[in-house]
Image (cartoon, rainbow, N blue to C red):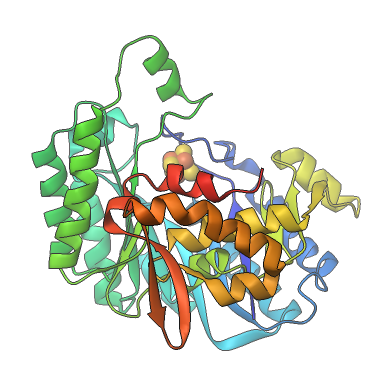
Amino acid sequence: MAGIYIHIPFCQRRCIYCDFYSTTDADRTVSYVRALRKEFQMRKDYLHGETIETIYLGGGTPSQLSVSLLAEILDGIYSVFEVGENAEVTIECNPDDLSEDYVRGLRSLAFNRVSMGVQSFSDEHLTRLRRRHSAAQAIEAVRCLQKSGIANISIDLIYGLPGETLSEWKSDLDKAFSLDVPHLSAYHLMYEEGTPLYKLYQQHKVSEVAEDLSVAMFETLIDKSAAAGYEHYEISNFCYPDMYSRHNSSYWHGIPYLGCGASAHSFDGRSRQWNVASLSEYIEGIENGKLNCETEELDICTRYNDFVMTALRTSIGLSISQMRLQFGAELSDYCMKMARTSLSNGLLEIVERDGDRYLKLSRKGIFVSDDVMSDLMWV
Ligand code: SF4
């Protein structure tokens, strides 16, 4: 079992908080898709013939590509790899790209899941973030997808926006839940270095929300999503029963994936590889039969750190027997020793399930998850 991630690095314009690799130069979409198809051929053995169970087109803005270019990408994947019959095939979309015609086009392809960057239901905040859609367009896009029969929809929201109040965040959540979408990802706004937002922050033109408001927003998110029937299955992710993102869950469970396209990352269980974050270097390299990328072999301690960090983010937690099996007695004893303080402070707990014991964050621990996890890291 494995996954494929395709990075589509085109955006109509850049949102002020975003540090993902993308460009507003839309002239090279055709040559980019040609390069992607070639990369599939060049890397067809990366996953050792494993069946592909998830495909994820992320960005950037994949919905900036025409339906015929998307069809070429999927055709390239399906003709090179063995894709499972019930594979989850997700595309990230911007709400204002989702016209009825476009959605009909997506329906005609293999896509069975749409992840949409809504971010806020306040037009004022959307404008400040330089999003290019309104709240009404996001609601309309969800309705359009649902009418077309694409029911597996995820929406992204951001909280902790400059000047945002708790009641605005509550209202965003109420609107999100009223849409009856089965999956929600909610992230606290980050001030990433190099972004226009970070510059505004340095110039004291915007400021972070207060710590106690951040905590109250996260608490509200957890409580309201539970009341609305969502399972909190990963720190930032919520879903109706069984509607979790299979693709993202495989990242958290260490399943190998191939990442194609500029800046895409791959993981084969032993090493990480990442493609160059430059459209022209990526395309030109592939045209000359060379993949511009870097590789990092992962030693056992790095793999242990990744395992702890990803497993503890999930509601299932970290399987103690799996840790021992994968990393041996020394590292698993180290982990349990380092967990003692958080266990006695009630930040971590041990639960028994199906004959195994799992180490997981308690409700209290979720709010300080970074600190708890860093205590368990091998340094
Ligand atoms: S948030 Fe999405 S749409 Fe906005 S610049 Fe980043 S990748 Fe593009």
Quadrant housing residue 326: bottom right
Q: Position of residue 319 (x, y in %)?
A: 52, 73
Front residue (pair 79, 189): 189
The one of 24 and 225 positioned closer to us in this rendering: 225
Q: Is residue 161 left or right of residue 46?
A: left
Whether residue 88 is visible to the viewer of this picture, yes or no, is yes
How far across and how far down the image is residue 207, in percent? Answer: 29, 20
Name the residue located 77 percent from the left edge and 45 percent from the top edge.
282
Task: Say which of 143 and 170 sits in front.
Answer: 170
What count of labels does the image hold?
A: 0
**Where is residue 176, by image quadrant?**
bottom left
Residue 261 vertical placement versus 358 (above, below): above
Camera-side residue of 257 and 309:
309
**In this rendering, is residue 31 above or below 127?**
below
- Is 321 left, or right, of 96 in this rendering? right
Above or below, 274 against 227 in this view is above
Q: Quadrant of ligand 1?
A: top left
Which residue sits at x=14%, y=55%?
Answer: 175
Residue at left offset 23%, top offset 40%: 215
The C terminus lies in quadrant: top right
Tell me if 50 is positioned left or right of 15 in this view.
right
x and y percent of residue 177 in the render? 16, 62
Quadrant housing the N terminus: bottom right
Whether residue 60 is visible to the viewer of this picture, yes or no, is no
The spot of residue 217 in percent (x, y) is 20, 43
Q: In the image, 322: left or right of 236?
A: right
